[in-house]
Amino acid sequence: MSQPVQMVKFQNIGQFRSTVKGYTRAMEVVDTMPTTVEVFGTTKLHGTHGAICFSKDHIWCQSRERVLTEEKDNAGFCKYVNSIMPELTKAHEAMALADDEILAVYGEWCGNKIAKGTAIAKLSKKFFAYEAAICKSLDEPVILAGSEYNHSYDWLKENHFTFVMGAWMPFDCVQVGGKFRFTVDFTKPLEMLESMQKITNQVEQECPVAKQYGEVGIGEGIVWYYDMDGVRWRFKIKGDKHASHGPRIRTPEEEEALRVLTAFATEHCCTMSRLNQAWDEVINEKNGGLPDIKKTGEFVKWIVKDTIKEETDLIKENGFDQRALNRVITFIGRNWFIDKLDEDANLKAHTDSVKE
């Protein structure tokens, strides 16, 4: 039986700093992890995500979050896909997909009135594919080495993707703007980021994809990827003008300062005694109060306020910045509170099952 029409989600793309954290942790536990990796990049286009999917018996399109229809469209993408359905149907006939397979072609729907601020927005609406995968199981993706992945997605290699695009698909791919290649040394993340940011800023200065269509102007950034052990990893770097926050990586000095702050917060601020007291005060179970995720902020504020009242002398003696310390306390307190909620929920579920 053919795979039905359904969402085939594209995996979220994280920042370079997340990849660095995940990859360096992996290097600590896997001796065979290489310290350097060759990564490939394509121009990041500023539009809205779209995908065209094929199963053995169906063709459909989707946005990032839902399957589309012309009645519930996304910036006219479904209407566009329906307009090229004869070409897609012809391509579909040549695919010979198995019953359990879906071919998902992912890309960016961009151009006039979709997103502003880049050269690509000056073009008439176009779909640019950037990757494609054969998908079988549609389980939720997991996080590994700083990237989101689904082990059942078989991503097309570059030569296969180029063939599929050239032989079957009636639209262009983002590779028309060229590809980038860079060797990342994960033992030198700051140097790597600086070098890749320079490449990215060149793309921001002049979008290579829009230039192929006669429009000269600003681009957005680069999406980088690499394949390892059958999994495709990705990260993005935006140009300085598009980054909502910088692709920040802490220096060794900042890491040490954070370690010292975290140790102090754990030993003097977020003690088990204070955490449990905060729980009792905020949840107030003795008077009928119930655990609620909505009380997270109140819980954290109680800890910060009590810490300032009781530990100010130690904070000043160590020369800690109160705002920086508050951020660490918030992080520790929030995680403890959420874990406590889960623990109580699991205990209640177990108790209820025993009663039954």
Image (cartoon, grey):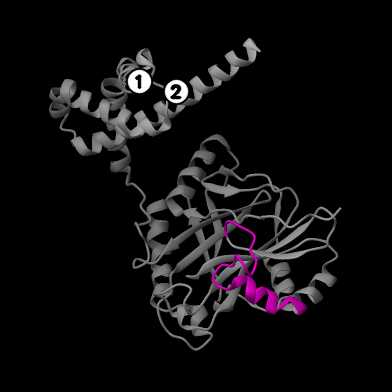
- Residue beneath the point at 61% across and 46% down: 141
- Mark 1: few/some/many CA within 10 Å (<14, 14-19, 20+): many
Left or right of 286: which side holds 80? right
Boundaries of the magenta span: 64-86
Q: Nearer the viewer, residue 41 or 101?
A: 101
Predominant secondary structure, magenta span: loop
Give coordinates of residue 347: x percent, y percent.
Answer: 54, 17
| Image quadrant where one finds the C terminus | top right
Question: Disc 2, disc 1: CB below 8 Å?
Answer: yes
Instruction: Say what amino acid the circle numbered 1 marks.
Output: Trp
- Mark 2: few/some/many CA within 10 Å (<14, 14-19, 20+): some
- Using the image, tell me which numbered label, if any, was put on residue 340: 2
Q: Is residue 346 above or below residue 45?
A: above
Residue 79 sits in which quadrant? bottom right
Q: How far is disc 2 from disc 1 in space, using C-alphas?
A: 9 Å
Q: Is residue 241 above or below residue 99?
A: below
**Mark 2 element type:** helix
Instruction: Say what amino acid the circle numbered 2 marks.
Output: Lys
Left or right of 274: which side holds 40? right
- Using the image, tell me which numbered label, if any, was put on residue 96: none
